[in-house]
Image: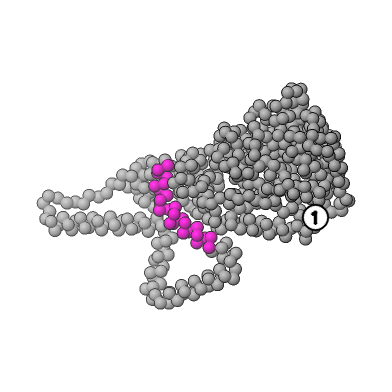
Amino acid sequence: MTRRMTALLADLDPAARVTVRHRRPVGVTPEDSVGVTLGKLAGWLLRAGLAGLARLAVRYRRTSLALLIVLLAVDRVGWRPLAVAVALLAGGVLVWRIVHPGSYRLWLAGRLAAWWRRWTRYAPRWGRLMARHNLTVTANDVEQWPRLLRVRTTRARDSLLVGLRPGQSPDDLDAVTVPLAHALRADEVQIRVHRPGRVWVDVRRRDLLATPIPALPIPTTPDLRALPVGLREDGAPWTLGLLGTHTLLAGATGTGKGSVLHSILRGLAPLIAAGVVEVWGIDPKGGMELYPARGLFTRYADGSTGEMADLLMAGADYTRIRAAELKTRRLRMLTPSVETPFVLLLVDEFAFLSAYQPDHRLAASVDIAVQIICSQGRGPGVGLLVAVQDPSKDVLPYRQLFPTRIALRLDEPVQVDMVLGEGARARGARCDAIPPWAHGVGYVRLDRQREPIRVRAAYPTDTDITTLARDYPAPLAIPGPRTAAADMPAVPSATAVTDPYLTEAELDPEWQAFIRSRSRAGKTLH
């Protein structure tokens, strides 16, 4: 391909620039008079100007076509009929905004806001921004940068759909998210893969997770694949699946791990009371975290390490027994029911049973039990939820057995990749930069998902926890031995449950109202 053809094709691309342009000379000679010289120069400038206008018209074809249609309409009917039509249209839009503000924001306001932000905030500086962050590709005197294809906007963030150039990868943009955020005056920039060759650049302008979230309404019909735990950074509900997976929760002391645990229990409460779910609780801190919710646990231990280890090993034995039952029934996956409930083993401060355990034989037994549950519990309906402060391999050498991982604030940058997987911090999960006051804020990474998601767990108060344990007790709770936390009162037995779920009239309106009020600000407007 000739240089002239290459330059012509580059002129048609808004995301390209010809670095060396071979222009036709002006043609001025020493013999030319002043008048002839000025005439040639004026002709050359006219040709260059017309060529530039032609390039702009071709580059921005839709804008040029719209402008041409307006000019033709003015020429044919005059400007007054057009002004009347515009006034009527504006009046209709105003009525729409007053009568149906929700649909107005969804179908028009969001599109207009996205269009305005694209052409006033991003498009005019996009090429320079990419060049200053070394995100350009140069070949044959043509400099190309990622194309800005689309912009979506909400009250909290802008999402930019970007087309990569040959030779570029999402990792190239991941490497410059911090300087990009500063250049755009944004709180954070994160990269999400849309499809091969295209990525979303999320520019967060406002933090919807800055304020604590009160305890969520108890779901009427809980779904073990999508339990409400809190909110995502876009304002949508953060849901967590427990069926068919195991969960690792890591965070330094005082980061809000208890908020995550008790929000999960809150989402499970109707199923616990119905007998469809059993939760076995283990609290090595003597019950400081889990004992207030004692009534929710079918089995519970917070005394000696031997008792807690025995409960974990009982979970491993139960996993193998349940697997054998499924084998005889020729089933690969359990469907939770009152007869065959889903069992969740919830272990707080796991390090006290493993790395910090002086009895090495007991620690080895705990490790074996955890590995059995993690490797075999998915099909039989046995899940494991482990909370740790130190995510190092000394504490949990088999982190890869936990498909779902949640990282709250961590002490060191290297710990982020320990929990969420290699490259997670480079992709935006800066758990070490979470402020100490942001309890319950963290990042979650699901199995087979490249990008971590920023979330915040709801905060159930002590009153919320004790009320929940009183109103939704486990019907088959097995009293445990006297614990270190306090003298254990008798575990209340639930009355007979005829319906595994609460009626829709009891709580569903509260839940729906809560989600509408909390997610309205972050709802994506196309």
Q: Amino acid at mark 1?
A: Leu
* Residue 292: x %, y % from top left: 77, 43
Residue 207 falls within the magenta-colored stretch:
no
Left or right: residue 446 compared with residue 316: left
Left or right: residue 193 compared with residue 353: left
Residue at the image point whose x is 74% and y is 31% from the top? 370
Q: Which residue is most to the right? A: 496
Q: Residues within 10 Å of mark 1 (few under 14, many from 20)?
A: some
Residue 112 falls within the magenta-colored stretch:
yes
* Residue 377: x %, y % from top left: 76, 36
Nearer to us in this view, 417 or 321: 417
Q: What colouring method underlies this structural image?
A: one colour
Is residue 97 positioned above or below 174 on the image? below
* Residue 505: x %, y % from top left: 77, 60
Nearer to us in this view, 486 or 248: 486
* Residue 254: x %, y % from top left: 64, 39
Is residue 389 positioned above or below 97 on the image? above
Image quarter (top left, top right, bottom left or bottom right) of the C terminus: bottom right
Residue 15 visible in rendering: no
| Residue range corresponding to the magenta coloring | 109-133
Give the labeled residue for mark 1. 502
